[in-house]
Image (cartoon, rainbow, N blue to C red):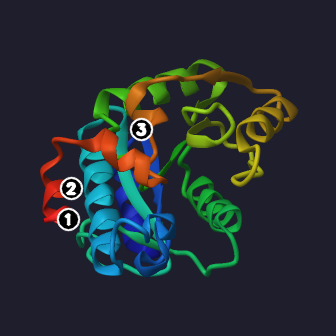
Amino acid sequence: MLSDLRRRLDRRRGACLLIAIKERAHCKTRLAEVLPPGARIELVRSMLTAVLAAAGGAQTVHQIMVISPERDLVPAEFPVLADTGESLNSALLQAHTLLREFGCAEVVVLPADLPKVTAAEIDDLVRAGRTGGFAIAPDAAGAGTNALCLATTLPFRFQFGPDSHRLHLREAQRMGLSPQVVRLPGLEFDLDSPADLNLLQGQQWLARLRA
């Protein structure tokens, strides 16, 4: 797989996009009171499909990869980089190191639970990252991190977890980068709680899950 990935990166220029997702059965457990296990798995698969589609339509993105402990139903054209389960930050560090070794100077990190994200928003994030070497999209509360763009060949210490927005900004500043904060509706909205489901009314795949 690594040799095939190297060939893909050698042929193309632009951002490499990493989409992180856990083992499907362990995703969105906070929705257990409103969705049974099978429906939660279908939900996270549907959201991943939506994020892959948005990434595929972004003009600034030329390679898309998934970081996960399992391939599940990820289409064959998308490489899946192994997540050993140690931590998301560790998996991202390994993936970022690999991509830098392959010469990829622009890396975007997205979670798989951004069902409203658009290709245009991803392009805006990448262009902001190119401005100062680093761009971050916080969650709606302004405390977490919903997306990152690294436009640098330097190693980066990922800080996903509590207070990640502040910690990521601090890490970027430590590296001498000029952080750009990107606030856009599709990047801010991550689906975590039962209340968030109500904000997705009109989505055909959501109606199917609740049927």
71 horizontally vs 53: left or right: right
Side (left or right) of 147 relative to 198: right
| Residue at x 31% of width, y 56% of height | 47
Given residues 128 and 202, the one toward you in this image is 202
Label 1 to label 3: alpha-carbon separation: 36 Å
x and y percentages locating residue 111 in the rendered image: 48, 53
User: Residue 79's quadrant in the figure?
Assistant: bottom left
Label 2 packing within 10 angstroms: few (<14), some (14-19), many (20+) = some
**In the picture, residue 172 is in which quadrant?**
top right
* Most distant residue in the front direction: 33
Disc with the residue nearer the chain's start (1 vs 3): 3
Identify residue for label 2.
Answer: 206
The image shows residue 203 at horizontal and vertical percentages of 18, 46
Q: Residues at badges 2 and 1 in contact (C-beta under 8 Å)?
A: yes
Query: Who's the residue at 78% across and 35% down the image?
Result: 166
Q: Residue at x 28, y 43 (%)?
A: 200
Q: Which residue is mark 1?
A: 209
Mark linked to residue 14: 3
Estimate the spatial distance between the alpha carbons at disc 2 and disc 1, rounded to whole Å: 5 Å
Q: Amino acid at mark 2?
A: Leu
Q: Nearer the viewer, residue 159 or 200?
A: 200
Q: Secondary structure at mark 1?
A: helix
Q: Is residue 94 above or below residue 60?
A: below
Q: Nearer the viewer, residue 207 or 15?
A: 207
Residue sitting at x 33%, y 76%: 36
The answer to whether residue 78 is seen in the rendering is: no
Q: From the viewer's perspective, tell me whether residue 153 is left or right of residue 66.
A: right
Identify residue type, mark 1.
Leu
